[in-house]
Image (cartoon, coloured by chain):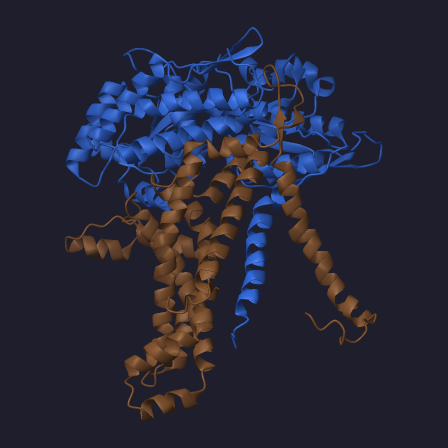
Chain colours: A brown, B blue
Amino acid sequence: MTLTATRPKRRFRPALWVLTLPFVIMFALFFIAPIIYAIVDSLFSTKASGLGFGAPEKVFVFLDNYTAALSTPSFVESLGRLLLFSLIEVPLMVVTALGLALLLESARARWPRFFRVLYFVPYGVPGVIAALLWGFLYIPATSPVLQGLAAVGIDIDPLSSSGVLFAIANIALWGFAGYNMLILIAALNAIPTELYEAARIDGASEWSITWNIKLPLVRPSVILVTVFTIIGTLQLFVEPLVLRPLTTAISSDFTPNLAAYNQSFAEGNPSLAAAMAVIVAVIGFVFSFGFLRLVNRKGNRAW
Amino acid sequence: MFGLRTHRSIRLAIAGVVTVGVAASLAACSSSGGDTASTASAENPVQITFQSWVPNIDQAVDAFNASHDDVKVTLETVTAGPDGGYAKMLSAVQAGNPADVAQLGYDAIPDFLVNDALEDITDYVGDSSDLFVPWQWDTGVFNDKVYAVPQASGPLGQFYRKDIFDSLGIAYPTTWDEYYQAAKTIHASDPNKYITAFAFNQAPWLIGLSQQGGANWFSTSDDAWNVDIADASTLKVAEFWQKLIDEGLVKIEADFSSEWNADIQNGNVATWISGSWADAILRGTAPDTAGKWAVGAMPQWQAGQDVSATWAGGSASAVLKGSKHPKEAAEFALWLNSDPESVNILTNVGAGWPAIADTSQITSLQNDPDVFSFYGGQDIWDVFAASDAAVDTSWKWPPLSSTLFSSLTDNVKSAVEGGTPLTDAYTKTQDDMVAALKAKGISVN
């Protein structure tokens, strides 16, 4: 913006204000205010005294809730678990969505519209319902799949401690792969067909068209999908909450969000919950922006 | 469609999505100072809201409304306490618009007091203590002030599949040794069959077993709490269940889960130790097994003893802080839990073992064809009456019982999952609980 000299003079435009004001108000009320409230609340703590039967008082404890959260081994473990989950889920999601999109957009795809809808349908199923349905499929007593496998001698327990992260990754993959696929298909559709024609005239194979034209051109969308998936995995909450009663492998602080929920609603400590939520939000920012910086560095076009 | 300038919009999207997450997880924490004046106005009729999770309790509310002109009660159904009902009540108190009367477990009353969420109703119901069983009345009394009217207790009994026991030729286990032998016989008869589900998700169940083993986890002295979760009695109970788990004689399974429901229906789980109110749950979950069940007393640690316990005490009605009509609310709570007509309804719908001292007018305890026929004609109330009389009434619930429940189930889960000793789960819970109480500023000896 160095063109200040030639820029037309600022005029008061009422329409602009009328149209943006509702958004600004709502944004301030439902996004900014709760964040400020959470940050403020995380600096306080309610203290009782004696036997605990008198009225408690609210005291300023500064960063005590943050130290408390970060010195709770199970909370730190849940952060580590989340990291592990991201390492499983993010590549799995991006590769699956990209694979589906490339398959459906290839010249030889059959009934691409039908399959596009089919893959997208799970996204329309609410997360809680999806987790419940998968929960039934993960328990030997109610799962026809596991019963069938057991009949031929294969015993798997998706909800054991070694399998539970994959079981959850599977639910998330099932729910969101189709959605991410649509984003990538839209990007693929935007590629001018002249590029393909030119490549074919030059004798390029389907594989090298995919590798040298399609992939580089959908790169921004792949980044978008990756960032969305990183954010999604950091907010992991519904699936473990629903599966928790079904297995000993999921504790009440399995993920940081679940830990915050537990503090707020089971243990009656909303201030500590606020501190935990702020920690998760900060990690979300760091990871998302870190990833963007990494992929958008100058000269980093080879990924 | 996604040009070179994409990352700017991505950043906005990130900001938005992250914010939504934070906002959603914190929305429920918001509060505004509750400063509603509690004036019992003379308007006619006074409107009262009552929050409860007991199925069909509306019948008792209807009976109240039919017999009272000056007060009208509206029932609001909430999720059972620890699963969200309490959180809803506490948030409403903080926000300054609570329901007037709330259903509270005995274990939750100290928790609500720590949150300053209950009205002192001594002036309205303080002279009614004679109507109730003394230990149940006392669960609502702190520092000589009355905060809740007891409704019903949950004395433990053992529901068992009489047909399975009979077909295997096993006598009803009166001691835990016999219980262990029965567990072996049942599992040997069919590898899919177990004597019971080890309900790792149910703190009240785990606590009830310890209490029946002679444990007394909480007491007060010198204006401070004594916490004794890992005492010898508790560890003895833990070691017993450890043996059953190690030998694969119990099914590691959360009760009330879909898997457990299936196992109760198909007889893979042959017994269930639970509160008296569980009869209604069993009848609802497994109607096809009617006539096959019976109820017996808890197995004893020493032959000839008669020691019982409760499923997290029982349930009470309390007036929430900020109620606009505390007097009428307290009077409704008293009527609901002591009027014979109401108590009859409550007993019938499965609220639990009545807290009133004189149960002679409670006809549903004497003859209830629906209940008795499900249990092969047995008068199961005899068992629970005896159990209620055998409860150690000195058991006290601490503040932060919700922390206790959540910590205990987490620790037991991780012991079962990691193969570490169950006794460690109790020592860890002891440490967790002491730390939580101290962090809250509560004195611990």
- Residue closest to the far top: B222
Q: Is residue B445 above or below residue A96?
A: above
Image x and y of residue B238, in percent: 31, 22
Q: Which residue is pictured at 72% across the width and 59% down the height?
A: A24
Q: Is residue A220 above or below residue A193?
A: above
Query: Picture quarter containing residue B115?
Result: top right
Q: Is residue B306 visible?
A: no
- Residues B418 and B77: in front is B418
- Residues A5 and A201: in front is A5
Q: Which residue is pictured at 52% across the width and 42% down the height?
A: A279
Asked if residue B321 lies left or right of residue B350, the reply is right
- Residues B393 and B418: in front is B418
Query: Picture quarter containing residue B426?
Result: top left
Q: Is residue A293 visible?
A: yes
Image x and y of residue B187, in percent: 19, 34
Image x and y of residue A96, in percent: 35, 66
Asked if residue B207 lies left or right of residue B402, the reply is left
Image x and y of residue B139, in percent: 57, 18
Q: Is residue B377 above or below residue A169?
A: above
- Residue closest to the far bottom: A201
Number of numbered discs on residues: 0
Asked if residue B183 lies left or right of residue B98, the reply is left
Q: Which residue is pictured at 65% across the width and 47% down the height?
A: A34
Q: Which residue is pictured at 15% across the width and 34% down the height?
A: B188
